[in-house]
Image: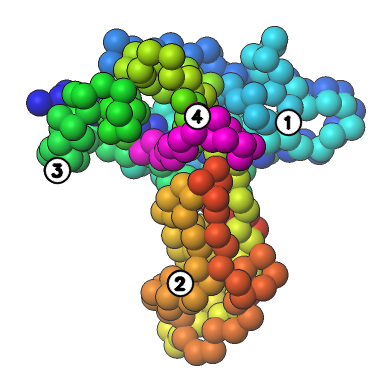
Amino acid sequence: MPPRAAAVAAIGQVLFSRFTPTNATTIPAGTPSISSAGVVTYSGGALVQTADGTQPFQVIPDPTQTYFNVAANAYIIPAGVMSGQATVQAVNAGTQGNVAAGSITTISTAIVGVDTVTNSTAYADGANQETDVQVMARFQLYIQSLRAAIKSAVESAIAGLEQNIQYEIVENQTLGGATQNGFFYVIISPYTTQLHDLVYAAIDAIRGLSITFAVYAASQLTANVTVTITAATGYTLAAVEAAVQTAIQNFIATIPLGGTLSWSQLYAVVWGVPGVALPVTGLMLNGGTSDLVATAQQDIVAGTITVN
C-alpha cells in the first residue's frame, strides 16, 4: 500500500496596492524547501492573512507573474505603478486555505510602499490528507504502472506526488501541435516551479529509453460572468449577491483541466444559492451565451464575476 498523501496547501493570487506609487516596492518571496515526502514549504516571504486572522498566507516565487524578479526572489512593483499581483500559498495545509474571494485583506509583514492587499478570486485547490478511498484508487493505478514506460506509469508518477494535481498527457505531438513521434508533453495545474521540477523528475525516473518529454504550465482561459438576480423575501440582496458570486467562483474552480464551462450550468449554480428568487436575468459568459471550451493545454479560471 502506498503511503497516504499529505494535505495540500491552497495556492492563489493576491493584488498588492498602494496609494502613492512614487518609488518601486519590493515584496519578498519565500525560499522553498522540499521534505523527504516531496512536500514543498516556504519560509522568509511576506505574509498576508484573512480579515479574521485565522488563515495566513505566504508570498511564494512565481516566474509567470509580471513583476516577479528571479534574481531578487521578490515581486518588484515599479515606480508609477499602483498595484501588482503576486502568488501566495496557505501556511496551513488543507481545505481551510480555500478562502472566499475578498477575504484576504491584512498585510502581516511590514512592506514599505504597500498599503492594501486582496484576493479577487476564491481559492479551491487546498486538500486534506488523502482518504482511504483515494489511497485505494491511487494504489490501483500504481499496480497498473508497474509496467514502466506506459501511460499509466506516467499517471502514477504524477499522482503520487501530491493531491489535486491536474494534468493532461499529449503523445507524439509538440506543444505547438506538430507531429513528433517518441515525444510527449504533460500540462499541469496548478503550477509552481517547484512542482514542475518534482513532476519532471518523477516522470524522468520511469520513462522509456530515448523517449523524450516536457512539462508545461497550463495556460489560463478566463471566465467572466455577469448576472442579475432578485432576493427572496427575508433575504438581504447584497448578501445574496455575495453568495452567488462565491458560488460561481467555487463552481468554476471545480472544472478540470481541459474541461468545459457550460453557460446553462451557471443558471443551476445561481439557483442553488439560498435566497435567489425570480427573475434571474442577463446571464452572460464572456459577453455571450456560448459555452467556454478549454483545450488540453488550458485551465478555466474565474475572472470578473459581476452579480447585480
**Mark 2, secondary structure of its residue:** helix
Location of mark 2 (residue): 265
- Residue hosting label 3: 133
Q: Nearer the viewer, mark 4 or mark 3?
A: 4
Please name the residue that numbered disc 1 is placed on. Answer: 66
Characterize the local packing of mark 4: few (<14), some (14-19) or many (20 or more) Cα atoms within 10 angstroms.
Answer: few
Identify the residue at image location x=50%, y=68%.
Answer: 262
Mark found first going from the N terminus, 4 or 3:
3
Q: Which label is found at residue 181?
A: 4
Give me the residue at 67% from left, 31% from top. Answer: 65
- In front of the other: label 1 or label 2? 2
Report the mark closest to the observer, 3 or 1: 3
Q: Of the numbered discs in the image, which one, if any, rests on residue 156? A: none
Quarter of the picture containing the N terminus is top left
Label 3 is placed on what type of residue?
A: Val
Which one is earlier in the sequence, the residue at label 2 or at label 4?
Answer: 4
Is 51 displayed left or right of 114 in the figure? left
Is residue 119 something that shows in the picture?
no
Asked whether the beta carbons under mark 4 and mark 3 sit within 8 Å of each other, the answer is no
Badge 1: residue crowd in 10 Å (few <14, some 14–19, many ≥20): few
Q: Residue at x 17, y 40 (%)?
A: 137
Q: Are marks 2 and 3 in contact (CB under 8 Å)?
A: no
Rendering quarter of residue 195: top left
Q: Amino acid at mark 2?
A: Gln
Segment tinted magenta in the rendering? 164-181
Q: CA distance from mark 1 to mark 2?
A: 33 Å
The one nearer the camera, 218 or 45, is: 218
| Residue 30: % across, % down | 54, 17
